[in-house]
Amino acid sequence: VIESRRRIHAAHLDTIGRLTIAAEYKEEHSAGHIARVGLSAAVLARAAGTSPGEVEMIRHAASMHDVGKIGIPDEVLLKQGRLDDGEMAIMREHTRIGATLLAASDSDVIQMGAKIALYHHEHWDGTGYPHGLAGEKIPREARVCGVVDYFDATTMERPHRPPLSQDWALDSMTEQRGERFDPALLDAFFDCLPEIRQIREEYPVQ
Ligand SMILES: [Fe+2]
Ligand SMILES: [Fe+2]
């Protein structure tokens, strides 16, 4: 029984890996982003006192956060230049699409992935999307992912802008403490920043 459970677990992780590869297929540079966000989310979760078993789940689940981008048309996903309001609304749908793709799974990790996909763009003060949830109503694993995703995404090149510096990203995160970001999680993020930077060295931003 243990052997077959172990195999099913391995099959789940394999499926997750393949799903994320599918999602990153269209977007250049996104393979590194996905790996870094998964690993960084685990580091932050651990620093914030999460149990080891859940840390391991978050590592895999967070790597699925943008899986819904697979459903975003190329002309929006890959557009050079700023998105207009209509295009932005389409882009924001990657949260719901990701959740729909993942939600019906009976794997705990993939169910956590569905929550993270849905809520990783919610803000602590309720100004995020898709539901405008605030504070602890946002699942904690999604808040964890939101912090590390912001740091990684702002410091990498995007179709519409060059990469911003780590100092810029960190200042902007401090400014948004208690607004976009859960204050306790942001403090934990700064505590484990050396480890997060280490991950960036191992999986460099190209
Ligand atoms: Fe996202
Ligand atoms: Fe992301």
Image (cartoon, rainbow, N blue to C red):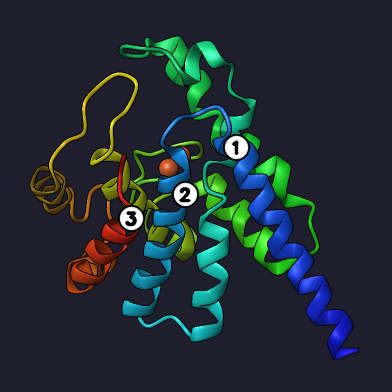
How far apart marks 1 and 2 lie (CA) works out to 10 Å
- Picture coordinates of residue 189 (x, y %)? 24, 66
Ligand 2 sits in quadrant: top left
Q: Quadrant of residue 168?
A: top left
Q: Which of marks 1 and 3 is nearer the N terminus?
A: 1
How far apart marks 1 and 3 lie (CA) works out to 19 Å
Q: Is residue 193 left or right of residue 157?
A: left
Q: Which of marks 2 and 3 is nearer the N terminus?
A: 2
Q: How many marks?
A: 3
In the structure shown, which secondary structural element does the residue marked by tag 1 occupy?
helix
Q: Residue at x 31, y 13 (%)?
A: 82
Residue tagged by mark 3? 148
Residue 10 vertical placement versus 38 (above, below): below
Q: Is residue 7 visible?
A: yes
Circle 1 residues within 10 Å: few <14, some 14–19, many ≥20: many
Amino acid type for the residue under numbered disc 3: Val
Task: Say which of marks 1 and 3 sits in front.
Answer: 1
Q: Does the residue labelled 2 lie within 8 Å of ligand 2?
A: yes
Residue tagged by mark 1? 23
Residue tagged by mark 2? 34
Amino acid type for the residue under numbered disc 1: Ala
Q: CB under 8 Å between callouts 1 and 3? A: no
Nearest to the observer: residue 32 or residue 164: 32
Circle 2 residues within 10 Å: few <14, some 14–19, many ≥20: many
**Image mark for residue 192:** none
Nearest to the observer: residue 32 or residue 101: 32
